[in-house]
Image: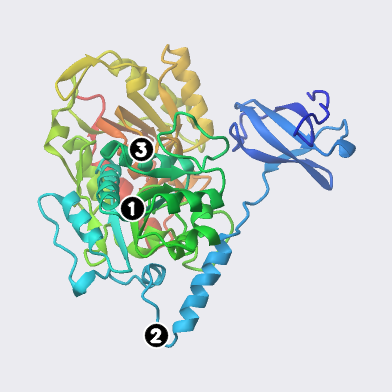
């Protein structure tokens, strides 16, 4: 259905109308509210914005020049126009010019150090401090001594990466240093700013708003990059600035380099973007975990260019090499019985739980990793059999006593997360749970849950066997995706899958590694039902 065109009014220069588009639930679309899209009309296209989205319907607000409106219907909805690279490409070119000017020597620059995987330089030629009893304090001491270089910190789930960032920033700014924080989203940047303000409420802090200023934001919100430059001049005794890669690649911003640039979620932050923003700072700190979800890559790239900043630095290793930085080896999220298989899968057995994590429990069920078998054949992206098993487990656990650091209460819908590899399976499970009376259980693909946690996490693998996989072994059996799914669990992680899941036509060493990782998890898991 298409509404009537509304002519421009006030500052709005385009005509607009609302479209309601029917969708096939068996062919899931990728769109979410707020997404920019292109509406295809034969050889032409018009801009639109998704207002609402469900499995069966999209509501789109369409825009058009007033003299180009028509009453026809679009033939397709496509992703929006590509994101503009400028000024990031200009910043990378500036780094290249700087490098050429110093040849045959290479410049002492954090971007070049990152590219070459050069160990961090500290003042007076000192070596990186050895990890001590207080690893956060050790990292902060090392950062303070950096001398125009790059340092990396790998923080697995629940290891306190954001806490570290908050304490570090507070210490640096109090000492009169200038600090920039960037990441792959405004939300991630603002999480770090909030952590810093929690550690030091009076910290001078600024970030341009994503769209309109938020009156509740606890930091200043300059309206433009020139205004941000002026704000920095007015706070010249130490300050914190947050922004995206576009902010820090801007020529006006990088003209006065920050003392430190912190790249959060550096395991998802593109290497090219890291090189671009490196020109705005004297030192770069990478925070993240390349063993969790990698950056979203679309298109094809020359070998190596598709890597994230932290992924490039760590290479083929599971944990950060000690000469390049630090590995935060203690998680406060996962019970030791959940942590152990995750540690073996993704962290070379080096990740362990803080003693307080062992205090969590669910009545009548030992904490840990479990396997719930669901026998089925021929399934690829949808399994009603596994949805039924998931529903049965949720019904069994719902209402049991959950104890967390001395506080006991019944488990509710909000305490259970279900992770599915495919949108179609997520919808199948959601419908089954709603019909069973559990509408509040969170269900989605693993991308939705990075950064979240819950007492109970169920992972439905969906496909009957690896031979049936529609997107290949490297998607369903991805160690990164399995790591993120299982590591959301505070006490109970349950794999729901076909007994024939690991039957595969293995053709490469990498595929063998993926299947071996899954077999390791299945071997470590106890059978469900528990007891």
When asked about the image quadrant of residue 36, the answer is: top right
Return the residue at label 2: 105
Sooner in the amino-acid sequence: mark 3 or mark 2: 2
Q: Is residue 407 left or right of residue 6?
A: left
When asked about the image quadrant of residue 4, the answer is: top right
Return the residue at label 3: 194
Return the residue at label 1: 237
**Residue 445 visible in the current orientation:** yes
Question: For the point 83% across and 29% down, which residue is it?
Answer: 7
At mark 3, the secondary structure is: helix
At mark 2, the secondary structure is: loop
Give the colouring mode of the picture.
Answer: rainbow
Mark 1 is surrounded, within 10 Å at the Cα level, by few (under 14), some (14 to 19) or many (20 or more) other residues, namely some
Question: For the point 42% across and 22% down, which residue is it?
Answer: 388
Query: What's the CA distance linking mark 3 and mark 2?
Result: 41 Å
Task: Return the residue found at the far left.
Answer: 133
Q: Position of residue 419 (x, y in %)?
A: 41, 33
Foreground of the two, 65 or 266: 65
Q: Where is residue 258 in the image (x, y as percent from the top left)?
A: 39, 59
**Residue 244 visible in the current orientation:** no
Sooner in the amino-acid sequence: mark 1 or mark 3: 3
Sooner in the amino-acid sequence: mark 1 or mark 2: 2
Viewport quadrant of the C terminus: top left
């Amino acid at each position: 259905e298409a509404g009537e065109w509304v002519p421009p009014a006030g500052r709005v220069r385009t005509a607009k109308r609302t479209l309601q588009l029917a969708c096939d639930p068996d062919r899931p679309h990728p769109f979410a509210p707020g997404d920019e899209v292109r509406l295809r009309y034969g050889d032409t296209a018009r801009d639109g914005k998704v207002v609402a989205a469900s499995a069966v319907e999209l509501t789109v607000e369409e825009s058009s020049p007033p003299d180009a409106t028509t009453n026809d219907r679009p033939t397709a909805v496509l992703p929006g126009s590509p994101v503009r690279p400028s000024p990031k490409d200009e910043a990378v070119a500036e780094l290249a010019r700087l490098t050429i000017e110093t040849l045959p020597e290479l410049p002492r620059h954090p971007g070049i150090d990152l590219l070459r995987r050069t160990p961090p330089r500290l003042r007076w030629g000192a070596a990186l401090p050895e990890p001590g009893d207080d690893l956060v304090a050790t990292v902060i001491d090392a950062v303070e001594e950096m001398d125009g270089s790059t340092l990396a910190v790998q923080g697995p789930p629940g290891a306190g990466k954001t806490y570290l960032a908050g304490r570090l920033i507070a210490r640096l700014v109090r000492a009169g240093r200038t600090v920039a924080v960037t990441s792959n989203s405004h939300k991630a940047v603002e999480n770090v700013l909030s952590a810093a303000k929690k550690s030091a409420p009076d910290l001078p802090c600024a970030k341009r708003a994503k769209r309109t200023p938020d009156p509740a934001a606890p930091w200043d919100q300059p309206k433009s990059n020139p205004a941000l430059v002026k704000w920095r001049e007015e706070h010249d005794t130490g300050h914190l600035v947050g922004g995206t890669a576009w902010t820090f690649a801007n020529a006006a911003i990088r003209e006065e380099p920050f003392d430190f640039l912190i790249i959060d979620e550096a395991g998802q932050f593109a290497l090219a973007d890291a090189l671009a923003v490196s020109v705005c700072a004297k030192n770069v700190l990478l925070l993240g975990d390349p063993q969790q979800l990698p950056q979203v890559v679309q298109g094809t790239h020359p070998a190596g260019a598709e890597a994230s900043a932290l992924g490039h630095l760590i290479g083929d290793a599971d944990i950060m090499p000690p000469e390049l930085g630090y590995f935060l080896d203690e998680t406060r999220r996962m019970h030791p019985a959940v942590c152990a298989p995750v540690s073996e899968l993704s962290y070379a057995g080096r990740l362990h739980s803080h003693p307080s994590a062992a205090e969590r429990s669910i009545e009548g069920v030992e904490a840990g990793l479990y396997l719930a078998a669901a026998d089925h054949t021929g399934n690829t992206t949808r399994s009603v059999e596994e949805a039924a098993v998931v529903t049965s487990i949720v019904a069994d656990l719902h209402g049991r006593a959950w104890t967390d650091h001395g506080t006991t209460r019944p488990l509710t819908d909000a305490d259970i997360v279900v992770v599915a590899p495919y949108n179609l399976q997520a919808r199948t499970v959601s419908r089954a749970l709603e019909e069973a009376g559990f509408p509040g259980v969170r269900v989605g693909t693993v991308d939705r849950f990075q950064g979240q946690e819950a007492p109970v996490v169920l992972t439905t693998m969906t496909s009957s066997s690896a031979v049936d996989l529609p997107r290949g072994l490297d998607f369903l059996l991805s160690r990164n995706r399995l790591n993120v799914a299982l590591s959301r669990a505070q006490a109970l992680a349950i794999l729901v899958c076909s007994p024939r899941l690991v039957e595969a036509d293995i053709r490469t060493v990498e595929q063998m590694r993926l299947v071996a990782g899954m077999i390791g998890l299945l071997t470590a898991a106890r059978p469900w039902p528990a007891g």
